[in-house]
Image (tube, rainbow, N blue to C red):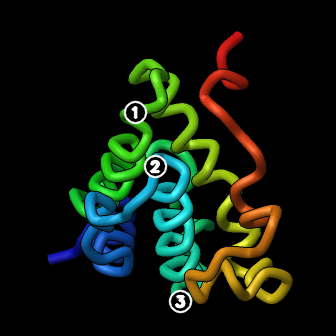
Amino acid sequence: MSLARPNWFSMMIDTAVGEPPDLGGVPDNWRARLEEFVRQLAEVWRQHPWIPAVTVGSRVMGPREAGWIESAVAALAETGLTGDERLAAVFLLFGHVPQHAVDGHRRNPALVRGQRAGPSRSAAMPSFSPSSARR
């Protein structure tokens, strides 16, 4: 039996990303939860640098990969953003993390180790507030 290429990639991606992060236990606020999400995502993508290249375009998404998106969207629940705005913010994160995950961790190793990166917090998480996202 031969697997179609898109399904094969979906299974590879879903296996590599592992279970979605449970951010419910992260204290503080939405920002702390997203920082933890980005740290975990960066670590997965650092371990599997091929993932960003195969996760572009129209394709079937597996349940674990979809769970990662749901986890990040849920972390933004208290922001006051609409569902569409939260989803857009999550996809923005997914667009920025590969650069930091694959080679950016050398510039900001604290991101991968799970430490805060000092006053600027993290290169992957620039200053942002829900009110600044509104038009």
- Amino acid type for the residue under numbered disc 1: Glu
Are discs 1 and 2 less than 8 Å apart at CB?
A: yes
Q: What element carries label 2?
A: loop
Residue, disc 2? 29
Mark 3 vs mark 1, foreground winner is 1
Point 22% across, 74% down: residue? 2
Q: Observer-nearest residue: 58 or 17? A: 17
Q: In which quarter of the image is residue 26?
A: bottom left
Q: Is mark 3 on a helix, strand or loop?
A: helix
Are discs 3 and 2 less than 8 Å apart at CB?
A: no
Mark 1 Cα within 10 Å, few/some/many (few <14, many 20+)? few
Spatial separation of the CA atoms under disc 1 and disc 2:
8 Å
Point 28% across, 65% down: residue? 25
Residue 134 x/y as whole percent: 66, 16
In this rendering, is residue 125 above or below 83? below
- Amino acid type for the residue under numbered disc 3: Gln
Residue, disc 1? 78
**Residue 4 seen anywhere in this rendered image of the structure:** no
Q: Which mark is residue 47?
A: 3
Residue 18 x/y as whole percent: 30, 77
In this rendering, is residue 73 above or below 115? above
Q: Report the residue that reaches farthest toward the right.
A: 107
Spatial separation of the CA atoms under disc 3 and disc 1:
31 Å
- Amino acid type for the residue under numbered disc 2: Asn
Sequence-wise, the earlier of marks 3 and 1 is 3
- Is residue 88 toward the left or the right of residue 104 in the image? left
Q: Residue 90 carries which label?
A: none
Point 39% across, 41% down: residue? 73
Quarter of the N terminus within the rendering: bottom left
Mark 3 vs mark 2, foreground winner is 2
Residue 54 x/y as whole percent: 54, 65
